[in-house]
Amino acid sequence: MTSEVQIQPSDVAEADWERAVALLRRHETVALACHVTPDGDALGSMLACGLALRQAGKRVVASFGDQAFQVPRLLRFLPGQELLVPPAEFPAGPPLMITFDASTVDRLGLLIPAAREAGELVVVDHHASNTGFGSVHLVNPVAAATAVLVEELIERLGLVVTKDIATCLYTGLVTDTGSFRYPATTPAVHAMAGRLLATGLDPDAIARELWDRSPFGYLRVLGVALSRAAFEPDAAGGAGLVWTRVTRQDRAQCGLPYDEVEGMIDVIRKVDGADVAVVLKEDDAGAWNVSTRSKGRVDVGRACAALGGGGHRGAAGFTSADSPEQTMARLRELLS
C-alpha cells in the first residue's frame, strides 16, 4: 500500500491525528507499549507501528508489562519481535510513548509508571470503555480493531505498509473480528483486508498459526472444561448463559501454559440458547481472568466494566480475586 490509498476516515478528532503525527515526526525515539497478556490486535498493532516507525528512521523500543514477559506461542510468527524488550529495560520516563489496545492505564501492568511519567502519551485504542487517559487520543470505539487506527496512522505519516507490517495488521484485524464473523465486520474492514492481502502476505499461514495449532495438552484441558460447563437458559435476562472454568491445576497436570486456553471460549459460545458465554481462567498467580462473549442480545462490555474490566458489547473481560462461584454471582446480577 502507498500513501495514495484512500482509507475511510475515522471518528477521531482531526486535531488529535495532527498532533500525533507532529509528535512522531519531531521525536527520534519512540517507546511503544500494549496491554498485558497481549492478543493478536494488541501485539500486532504495536509491532506494525514499530516496524513502520523504524522504516522512517526512528529508534523504537516496544514492550508489554507482564511479570513473566513472554510472547504467546500463537503470536510468535509475527514479524518485528526484535523490537521487544522486557519491562525492566523499558524507558522509565520516555519523552514520547504510544499505547495500543489498552482501555485503561491499569492494563499496562509493569509499564504503568512509564506511562505516567511519559512526556507525551498517545493512546491508540478502539474500546468503548476507554477511560481517556493519555495526552493524545486516537480512540475510535466504532473501529473493528486497533489495527484499523494503526493503518490510518501509518498512512498519515506517509509510510509504506510492507508485507511484514501488513502481516501484523492483518493479525489484529482477523483476530478482533473473529475471522470476519463479528458485527464489527463492515465493507471497510474487508477493504482493509484486501489492501493488506495485496502486499503478498499469506492468510493461510496466519490462520494456521492462530487457530490450527495446539499442544495435545490443550485437548485434555478442554475436555475437563467442557465436563464442567453449566448451561443456564434463564440467566442473562432470559437470553441464556453457558460458562465453565479452567484452574491452574488443570493446566499443570497437562503441562499447558496459561496463554493456550484463550481460545476455549470460542468452543463454549457455540451453545444454542445461550447468548452469553463465560470462561474463568486461573492464572499462575491464582487470579481469575474472566472472558465473556455475547451473540448480540446482552451487553457484556457494560457488565465487565462495572467489575473493573472492559471491552466491547460482544466481547469483554475482567479479573477477579474471588472464587469462581462468587465471581459468577456478581456477573449474573449485572447480566440480568
Image (cartoon, helix red, strand yellow):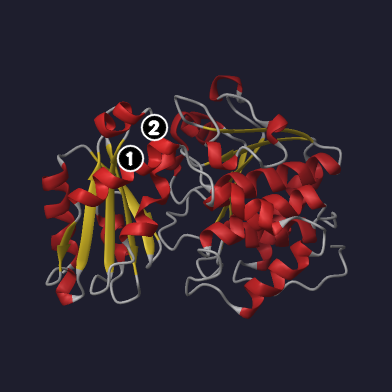
Residue bearing mark 2? 256
Image coordinates for residue 113, horizontal then vertical, percent = 48, 29
Q: Quarter holding the N terminus?
A: bottom right
Q: Nearer the viewer, residue 327 or 215?
A: 215
At 25% from the left and 51% from the top, the residue drawn is 226
Q: Is residue 112 left or right of residue 275?
A: right
Is label 1 in contact with label 2 (beta carbons under 8 Å)?
yes
| 96 versus 186 height, above or below | above
Rendered image quadrant of residue 331: bottom left
Q: Mark 1, residues whose alpha carbon is within 10 Å: few (<14), some, or many (≥20)?
A: some
Residue bearing mark 1? 220
Rendered image quadrant of residue 253: top left
Q: Is residue 213 in sight in this rendering?
A: yes
Eye-nearest disc, 1 or 2 = 1
At 25% from the left and 43% from the top, the residue drawn is 224
* Mark 2: amino acid: Leu
Q: Nearer the viewer, residue 323 or 143?
A: 323
Q: Quarter holding the C terminus?
A: bottom left
Q: Which mark is residue 2?
A: none
Q: Is residue 135 in sight in this rendering?
A: no
At 70% from the left and 32% from the top, the residue drawn is 83
User: Marks 1 and 2, how far apart in space?
Assistant: 9 Å
* Mark 1: amino acid: Arg
Q: Mark 2, residues whose alpha carbon is within 10 Å: few (<14), some, or many (≥20)?
A: many
